[in-house]
Amino acid sequence: MSYSTKKSLAYACRSRQVHREVEAMEFVRQRTSIPSVFEIYVNENDASPSSWFSMSAISGSPLTDAWPSMNDEARRATQADLRSYLHELRTVPSPTPAYIGSCSGGSAYDHRLNRVIERPWPRTRLFAPR
């Protein structure tokens, strides 16, 4: 769930999700030159069933809204930027030893899985649902 004003955005969700989202944003900020938002505040109340974080808003329109009115040159420039960001993300070295988990080394959270993953997994074979 998200809320926005002209100056900030707030996202509310389960506490574990908030921790993982903030960890991922910080991980990317520390290891890449990809433009990132400035974190304003994180509510990490583990006793609460939901937590939230807010961050500064960037002016402009979401790409899904802007794309139809963009000319070919602007679209190509945007595609080049996105391609560059993905390439940079793919060049971030994997941790050693490698594992399946959060970027902080803890357990992973994936809403697409219908079971809770309570630890990082050292090998894909151990992680795969049975």
Image (cartoon, rainbow, N blue to C red):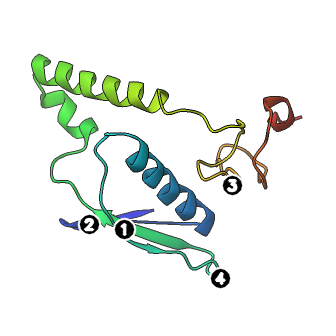
Earlier residue among tags 2 and 1: 2
Earlier residue among tags 4 and 3: 4
Where is residue 53 drawn, in percent x and y? Answer: 43, 68
Where is residue 80 drawn, in percent x and y? Answer: 25, 21
Q: Secondary structure at mark 2?
A: strand
Mark 3 Cα-neighbour bin, 10 Å: few <14, some 14–19, many ≥20: some
Q: Amino acid at mark 4?
A: Ala
Which residue, given by chain and number where applicable, does mark 1 sit on? 54
Of badges 3 and 1, nearer the viewer stands 3
| Among the 4 quarters of the image, the one containing residue 122 | top right
Which residue, given by chain and number where applicable, does mark 4 sit on? 47
Which residue, given by chain and number where applicable, does mark 3 sit on? 106
Instruction: Give me the residue at 25% from left, 37% from top.
Output: 63
In this orientation, which residue lies closer to the viewer: 34 or 2?
A: 34
Check the image and report above or below for 76 versus 29.
Answer: above
CA distance separating discs 2 and 3: 29 Å
CA distance separating discs 4 and 3: 19 Å
Instruction: Give me the residue at 19% from left, 18% from top.
Output: 76
Instruction: Give me the residue at 83% from left, 36% from top.
Output: 129
| Among the 4 quarters of the image, the one containing residue 6 | bottom left
Q: Secondary structure at mark 1?
A: strand
Left or right of 18: which side holds 95?
right
Earlier residue among tags 2 and 3: 2
Q: Amino acid at mark 1?
A: Ser
Mark 4 Cα-neighbour bin, 10 Å: few <14, some 14–19, many ≥20: few
Mark 2 Cα-neighbour bin, 10 Å: few <14, some 14–19, many ≥20: some
Where is residue 5 drawn, in percent x and y? Answer: 23, 68
Which residue, given by chain and number where applicable, does mark 2 sit on? 8
